[in-house]
Image: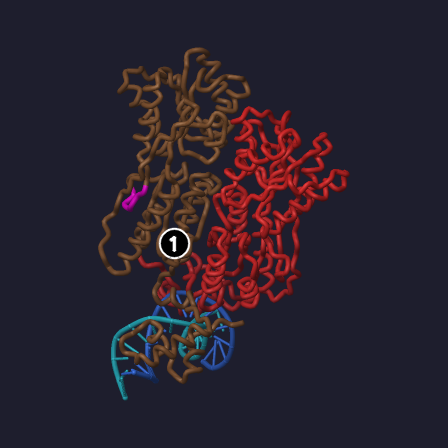
Chain colours: A brown, B red, C blue, D cyan
Amino acid sequence: MKPVDLKQIARELGLSVTTVSKALNDYPDVSKKTKLRVKNLAIKLNYTPNSFALGLRKQESKTIGVIIPDNVHYFFSRVIKGILEVAEKSNYLVILMQSNEDYELEKKQVDLLIGKGVAGILISLSNKTHDFGHLNKIIDSNIPLILFDKIAKNVNCSKVIIDDRKAAYDAVSYLIKKGYKRIAHFRGDLNPQNSIDRFLGYKKALLDNNIEFDSSLVYLCNNNSDFEDGYNNAKKLLSDHKNNVDAVFTVNDLLAIGAIKYFNDNKIKMPESIAIFGFSNWFMSSVISPSLSTVEQHGFEMGKQSGTLLLHEIYCKHNRVKVEHQRIVIQTELVIRDSC
Amino acid sequence: MKPVDLKQIARELGLSVTTVSKALNDYPDVSKKTKLRVKNLAIKLNYTPNSFALGLRKQESKTIGVIIPDNVHYFFSRVIKGILEVAEKSNYLVILMQSNEDYELEKKQVDLLIGKGVAGILISLSNKTHDFGHLNKIIDSNIPLILFDKIAKNVNCSKVIIDDRKAAYDAVSYLIKKGYKRIAHFRGDLNPQNSIDRFLGYKKALLDNNIEFDSSLVYLCNNNSDFEDGYNNAKKLLSDHKNNVDAVFTVNDLLAIGAIKYFNDNKIKMPESIAIFGFSNWFMSSVISPSLSTVEQHGFEMGKQSGTLLLHEIYCKHNRVKVEHQRIVIQTELVIRDSC
DNA sequence: TTGTATGCGTTATCAG
DNA sequence: CTGATAACGCATACAA
């Protein structure tokens, strides 16, 4: 079954291809009658414009590209859902790619997307990305680009983020207000801005509350298996500090859940013996025992806003409206449960 | 920065566009010297063929479409990861869509993909899909189609599935062997073949072991919020059957986790008072207390095999090789943990 | 109000 | 070995 094209409609109606094209695009210089005839037949034959021909003419397709580090992360799968929803509504298709935290792969994927002539690109950077040439290439190609969550500050484009520093500050402040004083931190990898900012928020909360910062309470987690990292560092934490630690703030929920597992396995009561605060509000955090206090990051909302903003910039580009790059901060919230 | 095209290379080298094209495509009737000159410059200028022009010529792009009910499900996000990996390796792009278990949306998305000229399509059907016209349309358009996990038996295409019936049979048989006799079943919605098959497997295991099937032990879960369904039905189960039930087999892990939550909340010991067996092996099943026995479904593997098979059928189509539609069954395994 | 000619970037055909 | 030309399906400047 070959798809119908303008030629076929023109033939059946005894018109020229041009007139048919104009009719379908509602040009003013086509009679109402003709328009009606054309449109009716188009619907009847279920005509769909050939997207390659359209792309070739307009140098652009109704497709956007999305690169994330890992779709299996609950947070990102929520973001994707948000992006897909807004794209869907505007009849844009979404090409999804996973960098698997691999910088070279991310670079290659950007090239593929540019080559594909996508209308715009959304990226959440891999942890290993420390050079931004590939991002500037997108900008130089005049393709709207938006970074979300894992961003690079010095790239000249719009960004959609949360205030990691403030969120961490709020979480740790909450712990302090509840009376915890020796608060450990399981921090993320050294590179990504997120983990830096969360660490800084942790530190600042301590200082603002006159609690001395003790670097021996900070554990680096970068084995790419957060759950195990959490489990192992929980063990290490207790052997290092025995009865001289009363809470842990982790850079993500998975680490927290690993720690909870260790504590449960060793019959260490939470929050009595040690309190835990996570980050991200994964679904499982609400069903684990004890349920985990954490920071709600609103991934779905971030996806929707990122998508909307990208479509907006695409629209501006089409209509030659100058875009002001934005920096949207999605509000976070503390979700208090049983772990502290 | 405008992308380089053949014309530019031709101009810089004093050649015709035709020759350049031939050189890049390794036609035999171009001199080695010319080929080298062309290829070097192409690399230097970072030439990428315009995918719209290519698509227009060949009526097909290196893009495949994937429709799933919900990316936020752990199983599907694993499948996606598998698909992305094999697509990546063959330089295919993946357009992802979520039907959100909505039949009309699924139909619309199929139209979009066909209109987009994708090289092939992978679908896991929505629970509400009971008419297959849109799938046949894909086949009529001569686009390779593969159904995975949520399939329709009577559609003439390849399928990648697990043996739901056997997997459920194995799980329930295991419970019986462990001595459980009054085994309830939290079943899924009435439509999808998966939940039917898992129910049948459950039933057959009972019969084969001379345990009378008691329909009052079967609970229908179709409120679209599995966790809550599990929680509520656990409550109902106990009030209905008090001390006359000793195990539950749930159609998925989320229901099981909801039930576990209820039992934990009410200090009902697992597996002593009641055992639980789930289905799918979500990540969280290994970290919850008690850890959940379940069926490993190998989503990543299913994604890889589905993707590979699709690419194979696309390849066959290109080379005019007749394809035999396959039915690949991914093996499942029982994962035994603390809940039974 | 309708139609003709042209070009988007590529490749296949055929002529030199 | 190389190149001119047509065609893929569509939109647009221009002519009628």
Q: Nearer the viewer, residue B189 or B287?
A: B189
Task: Say which chain tag 1 marks.
Answer: A
* Residue at left offset 35%, top offset 16%: A179
Tell me where residue A222 appears, x and y as whole percent: 45, 29
Residue A159 in the magenta stretch? The answer is yes
* Residue at left offset 38%, top offset 34%: A296
A159, above or below A195, in the image:
below
Q: Nearer the viewer, residue A89 or B257?
A: B257
Figure quadrant of the N terminus of chain A: bottom right
Question: Is B160 left, or right, of A222 in this rendering?
Answer: right
Tell me where residue A325 appears, x and y as whole percent: 25, 47
Q: Is residue B182 visible?
A: yes
Q: For mark 1, what is the residue?
A: A87
For the record, the magenta segment spans: A155-160
Q: Nearer the viewer, residue A115 or B234?
A: B234
Tell me where residue C1 appears, x and y as whole percent: 29, 83
Q: Nearer the viewer, residue B61 or A9?
A: A9
Q: Is residue B10 visible?
A: no
A173, above or below A149, in the image:
above
Question: Is B202 left, or right, of A244 in this rendering?
Answer: right
Q: Amino acid at mark 1?
A: Ala
